Image (cartoon, rainbow, N blue to C red):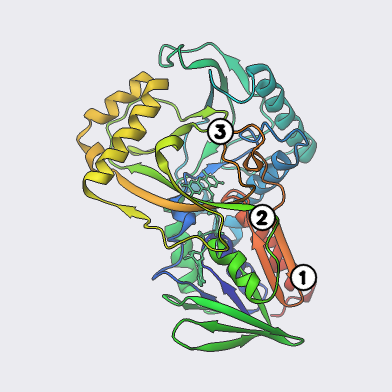
Amino acid sequence: MDIAVIGAGLLGCGAALELAARGARITLIEALDEPLRGAALANEGKLHFGHVYARDDSLATARLMLQGALAMGPALRRWLDDSSVERLPRGAPYRYAVHRDSLSSPEEIGAHYQACARLAREMLGTGRVDCFGADPREESLRIPLGSDCNPACVQALFQTPEISLDNRAMAALLRARVLAEPRITLLAATRVTRAEADADGITLHMQGGQSRRFAHTINASWESRLALDASLGIAPPPEWTFRLKYVVHLRGMRPLGFPPSTVCLGAFGDVVMLPDGEALLSWYPSGRRAVSQELAPPDWPRGMQGEAAQALREQMLAGLSEVFPPLLALGDDPAFAQGVVQGGVIYARGTRDVHEASSGLHARSAIGRQSYGRWHSVDPGKWTTAPFFATEVAEHIMPRQRQVA
Ligand SMILES: Cc1cc2nc3c(=O)[nH]c(=O)nc-3n(C[C@H](O)[C@H](O)[C@H](O)COP(=O)(O)OP(=O)(O)OC[C@H]3O[C@@H](n4cnc5c(N)ncnc54)[C@H](O)[C@@H]3O)c2cc1C
């Protein structure tokens, strides 16, 4: 069976590998020069266990994040191998600092974390968990404010079981695996512009005038997903937002002994600490640079260099170090000025931004696959949930019992 996958992000590469393992021939079509250079690379690699989504009282988002996080390890073991997964660099568990301007109180947030742990216990029972050494069943404990938190900003501190993975290392492994897979043909630097469907297949039209026909197509194009769906007459959801967000990726930093930390709940940020002097800084008020509610966002620049990049590094550090003063020392490290500023697009339902309590961005449960005959449009929602939905769409198209040798 010839299947097209549009978009070689974590979702698209995962779906391609999953289908290839089931005997399909895949054409993976990617607008950029290489797989895994889009949001899959720009993100912070946080494996969400639901903690950020404390404003979704239904717990639907927390449940999906947990499903996604628990599917990540087994999926990578299938697509890569056990030893690569074991060696994937990961951070220590996150602390969550509740900001004085948080949209939820420490008590509400503490209750939500208990609910996340309870959900994880319901899902996992008492068995072994394959989650990069983390265990989402662990309770998040409220801990005293350390001397590294500014009490004028932080009203409560929790130790959670959430971790980050080195998503760049993961992307490099998956890229090599996709390129080596004989059942996957990569069409890089090729943008799909529109699609046409009939009873037996899907015709894809690509920039430059080329067209190809496939038995099935997976739309894993993230930021082009709504526009490509629309070319088939599929209506977008009632409201949505594309946001351009930048993070700063620091390499070769002197060890600071600072734990990974998220500031919640609202328009704040994170500091991600990984082994070997790697760190990521993200401060939402400085890093979120553009918003679009069009069917496709403009061609926003993803890189940033020179003075603009230095200014953004300093703004990110200023925002974070107001909350965590010891982070100021990062600015004295010679490697700070080399920090790579990388932008990526975030798609989500809703039009209000995260500083508003009523924002739809505080839930991420209306995600996943929607199939229209042979066209399968997948919104993975998060990086955390991409392998889960990659597996799900592959299973929908080629259930395991129909595998061919
Ligand atoms: C700054 C930032 C931080 C984030 N942090 C986290 C986090 O810590 N944890 C988390 O779980 N999630 C996080 N996310 C969200 C996460 O990155 C995305 O949800 C996820 O990566 C989407 O995966 P994807 O494979 O669908 O997207 P992508 O990796 O963007 O893949 C889509 C691919 O499709 C290609 N493409 C687009 N249009 C076309 C077309 N017309 N034709 C051909 N190819 C096309 C693109 O070039 C791209 O390679 C973050 C996002 C950003 C931007």
- The residue at 66%/44% (across/down) is 65
Asked if disc 1 and disc 3 are in contact, CB closer than 8 Å, the reply is: no
List x then y, in percent, for residue 132.
56, 42
Asked if disc 1 and disc 2 are in contact, CB closer than 8 Å, the reply is: no
List x then y, in percent, for residue 327.
34, 25
Question: Which residue is labeled 2 in the image?
Answer: 388
Query: Dividing the image into 4 quarters, which one contains the C terminus?
Result: bottom right
Between discs 3 and 2, the one toward the N terminus: 3
Amino acid type of disc 2?
Phe
Question: Which label is found at residue 57?
Answer: none
Decide: few, some or many residues near mark 2? Use Cα within 10 Å; few <14, some 14-19, many ≥20. many
Decide: few, some or many residues near mark 3? Use Cα within 10 Å; few <14, some 14-19, many ≥20. some
Question: How far apart are the alpha carbons under marks 3 and 2?
Answer: 29 Å
Q: Nearer the viewer, residue 143 or 228?
A: 228
**Element at label 2:** helix
Q: Is residue 169 above or below residue 312?
A: below
**Element at label 3:** loop
Question: Which label is found at residue 355?
Answer: 3
List x then y, in percent, for residue 325.
36, 19
**Element at label 1:** loop
Question: How far apart are the alpha carbons under marks 1 and 3?
Answer: 42 Å
- The residue at 46%/81% (across/down) is 207
Amino acid type of disc 1?
Pro
